[in-house]
Amino acid sequence: MKQEDERIHVYFMPGMAADQAIFQNILLPGEKFDVHFLKWELPDIGETLEDYAKRMLKEIKHEKPVLIGVSFGGVIVQEMAKHVDLKRLIIISSVKCTDELPPHMKFASKTGLFRLIPTGLADYVDYFEKVAVGDFLKTRAKLYKQYISITDKNYLNWAIRNMVNWKCSKPDENVIHIHGDKDEVFPVKYINGAIKIRGGTHIMIINRFKWFNEHLPDLIEYGRLKKKGKVNKLIK
C-alpha cells in the first residue's frame, strides 16, 4: 500500500449476509473522503475468524485507512485491525468483546444450540438472524430482506458460529463504538463505553442515516464528536 495523498480512505463492512446497499444513504464529503465497500467472501472449509480477517486485508489498498463495520461486520473489522495500522476503527450496532454478547448468545455458544438453526433454507434467513445475530427481526424483515446478499449454507453456518463463539476478553481501546439504545440484537444494557443513539435500533445504519451523515466525518477525522466549533469528549 502506498500513500498517494492526504485524502482519508474509508472502508465499510456490512452486517452478516448483507451487502453494501445498507450504506446507500451514507454520504461523506467527497472533497476529503474516499469511500470503499468491502463485501463478504465465502469462507474456506475450516477457516478461522482470524484467518478470514487476514484474507480480507487484501482488499485494503491504502495506508492508514478507516475501517467501519456494522454488527458482525464490526467483529470482522476488529479482527482486521489487529494486523493493519489504522487511522480509525469504528463499529456500529456491534460488540467490542465477549462480555457484551447478550445471555442468549452466550448460552447458544455454550450449548451449541446455534447448530440447530436451519441455515440451508433461504426462507429461514430472517429466522436465523433473529435467533443468532438479529439483523432481520420479524418486525423489519420486509425492510431488511432486500439487503441480503448471501444465503450460502456454509457461509451462514460459519458466520453464526463465529459470532456467538467470538472470543475477545479485552476490547481495543481505540475502537469507537456507536450503538442504539433500542438495539434489539445487542441490548445496550450489556454495552459499555459507546456513543449511544437515542431511539437507534439494530438497523439504524439504514433508518438513522442522517445522524451518521452529520457526525461520521468528525468521528473519522477527530475521533470525537464535534459540536459548535469545539471538539467534545466522546460520549460514553
Image (cartoon, grey):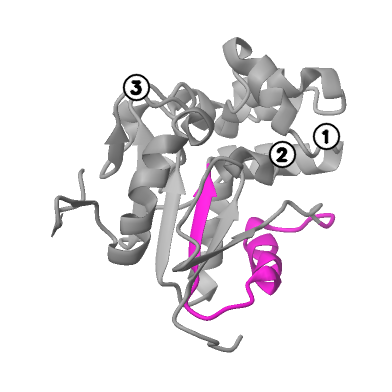
Tell me the magenta residue range. Answer: 44-70
Separation of residues labelled 2 and 1 (CA atoms): 7 Å
**Do labels 2 and 1 touch, CB within 8 Å?**
yes
Pointer 2 residue = 17
Sequence-earlier tag: 2 or 3: 2
Pointer 3 residue = 199
Amino acid type, residue under disc 1 in the picture: Thr
Pointer 1 residue = 151
Amino acid type, residue under disc 2 in the picture: Ala
Q: Is residue 53 magenta?
A: yes
Residue at image point 25% right, 56% down:
224
**In the image, residue 119 lies at what x, y percent?**
80, 28
Classify residue 72 as left or right of residue 198: right
Q: Quick check: 41 above or below 128?
A: below
**How dense is the environment of label 3, judged by Cα within 10 Å: few (below 14), some, or many (20 and up)?**
few
Label ID, residue 123: none
Occupied quadrant, residue 139: top right
Q: Quick check: 149 above or below 131?
A: below
Classify residue 155 as left or right of residue 100: right
**In the image, residue 200 lies at what x, y percent?**
39, 27
Q: Is residue 235 magenta?
A: no
